[in-house]
Amino acid sequence: LELARAVIPEVDKRLTAREDDVRFQRNAVFALIIVLLLALVYGFIGAYLSIVRGIDDLSLAARSMAGGDLSARVRPTSRDEVGALATHFNEMADSFALLIGNTVADAGDLTRSAEQVHDSSAQIESAAEKQNEAVARTASAVQQLTVSVHEVAENARETDRVTARADEAAH
């Protein structure tokens, strides 16, 4: 019994120490799980906010482009799918800007060509008017010449008649 009285406090002390160690380990595991859960939640929230910000930036740039601002671009802030989408959006915007620039240049060329055609048409119209005036003057001159030829022919007939009478009177 003496032995039991001497051993029991020692066993009790060791059991209490073991219980304290187990409680500490349990609390450490719970603390580690809580820290890991918080880190996981933080990571998910960070990823969510990053995706939402990237999509918001893309949406804003798309609205700007739809409003006519062809310089709207998105700065890729990540190397994930949203970052790749931002890069592709910028490439598309560059292509649109180039296409619109070429279209504007072609429209300018077309305008200049139309102006040249208009100028040529005005020159042709002016030349046609001058030709019409020349034809009218020529027609008038031909008509006057025709009248003169008729008068000469009439005078020649009258002269022929007078000559014929004079010839008859002389014979």
Image (spheres, rainbow, N blue to C red):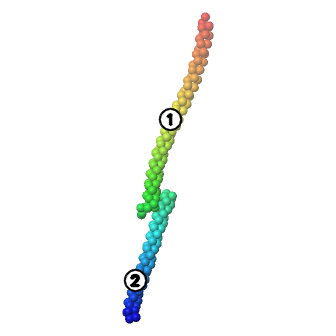
Identify which residue is drawn at 49% across, 59% down: 62
Q: Residues within 10 Å of mark 2 (few under 14, many from 20)?
A: few
Amino acid, disc 1: Ala
Residue 106 versus residue 82 in the image, above or below: above
Q: Quadrant of residue 5?
A: bottom left
- First in sequence: mark 2 vs mark 1: 2
Q: Quadrant of residue 71?
A: bottom left
Q: Looking at the image, is mark 2 or mark 1 nearer the viewer?
A: 2
Amino acid, disc 2: Asp
Q: Residues within 10 Å of mark 1 (few under 14, many from 20)?
A: few
- To which residue does mark 2 refer? 21
Instruction: List the single residue furthest toward the top.
Output: 171
For label 1, the SS is helix
Q: Nearer the viewer, residue 19 or 114?
A: 19
Identify which residue is drawn at 40% across, 84% down: 18
The answer to whether residue 4 is left or right of residue 147 is left
Q: Position of residue 149 (x, y in %)?
A: 57, 20
Q: Which mark is residue 57?
A: none
Identify which residue is drawn at 55% across, 23% down: 145
Q: Position of residue 79 (x, y in %)?
A: 41, 61
Q: Position of residue 16 (x, y in %)?
A: 41, 87
Q: Does residue 48 appear in this view?
A: yes
The mark total stands at 2
- Calculate the distance from the C-alpha at mark 2 to the C-alpha at mark 1: 114 Å
- To which residue does mark 1 refer? 127
Q: Position of residue 105 (x, y in %)?
A: 45, 48
Quarter of the image with the C terminus in it: top right
For label 2, the SS is helix
Q: Does residue 86 appear in this view?
A: no
Q: Nearer the viewer, residue 126 or 5?
A: 5
Q: Nearer the viewer, residue 9 or 79?
A: 9
